[in-house]
Image (spheres, grey):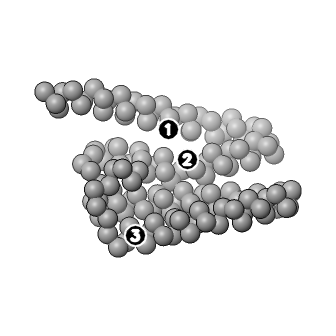
Amino acid sequence: VYARLVRADLALDLLNFLFLGLIALLPLATELLWEQRGRQAVPVYVSLVAAIGVAMGVAWTHAAFVGRLTEPMSVAERAFVLVGLGLLPGLVCGLAFASLVQPAFAILFSPLVGGLSLQGRRMRASAVQAAPAEAA
């Protein structure tokens, strides 16, 4: 994600500090999971991972759509990165924990994660095909 940025501003810096602050809480949430060994700590951990995804999504939204801080790319590509950053961390974490409690949850999340992965592959393939045409 950060490789796509060409510059930064104060708002992006503040959003990154929020993102890093949430990441700094992960060891605490992991320790809570270990000590509780029950289901009470799972929502805390999953919520933290989801909040990290949301913070990264907000930072990308600012960089790609509001501040125009990224390299030139299509709106579809910017939106795909946003969905991938904002949804996937929480979904994957939620899928892992929900599947432990109820395996049927894996069936609900799998098509969404698989669909996003397939769309990403299609976008990369079209970018690779477009690159030689632009070079010529």
In this view of the protein, can residue 43 be seen by the observer?
no
Looking at this view, is 24 or 48 the one in front? 24
Residue at left 60%, top 57%?
A: 50
**What residue sits 49% from the left and 51% below the top?**
85
Residue 134 placement, left or right of 35: left
Residue drawn at x 52%, y 60% as measured from the top left:
54
Q: Badge 3, how many Cα within 10 Å: few under 14, some, many 20+?
A: few
Q: How many marks?
A: 3
Task: Please provide percent x and percent y for residue 124.
Answer: 37, 33
The residue wearing badge 2 is: 88
Image location (x, y in percent) of residue 64: 33, 56
- Residue type (three-letter) at the residue carrying disc 1: Leu
Q: Please state the horizontal and vertical placement of residue 107, each as a whole percent of the image.
A: 68, 35
User: Circles 2 and 1: CB distance less than 8 Å?
Assistant: yes
How far separated are the C-alphas under marks 2 and 3?
23 Å
> In the rendering, which numbered label is found on residue 116?
1
Please tell me whether mark 1 sits on a helix, a strand or a loop.
helix
Q: Position of residue 59 (x, y in %)?
A: 42, 62
N-terminal-most mark, 2 or 1 = 2
Query: Residue 101 lies in what quarter of the image?
Result: top right
Q: Is residue 88 visible?
A: yes
Q: Quarter holding the C terminus?
A: top left
**Real-space Cα distance between discs 2 and 1?**
9 Å
Give the number of the disc on residue 13. 3
Q: Residues under labels 3 and 1: Cα distance?
A: 28 Å
Q: Is residue 1 above or below residue 15?
A: above
Tell which tag, 3 or 1, sits nearer the viewer. Answer: 3
Within 10 Å of disc 1 (Cα), the crowding (few <14, some 14-19, many 20+) is some
Q: Amino acid at mark 3?
A: Asp
Looking at the rendered structure, the kind of residue marked 2 is: Leu
Q: Nearer the viewer, mark 2 or mark 3?
A: 3
Q: Nearer the viewer, residue 18 or 114?
A: 18
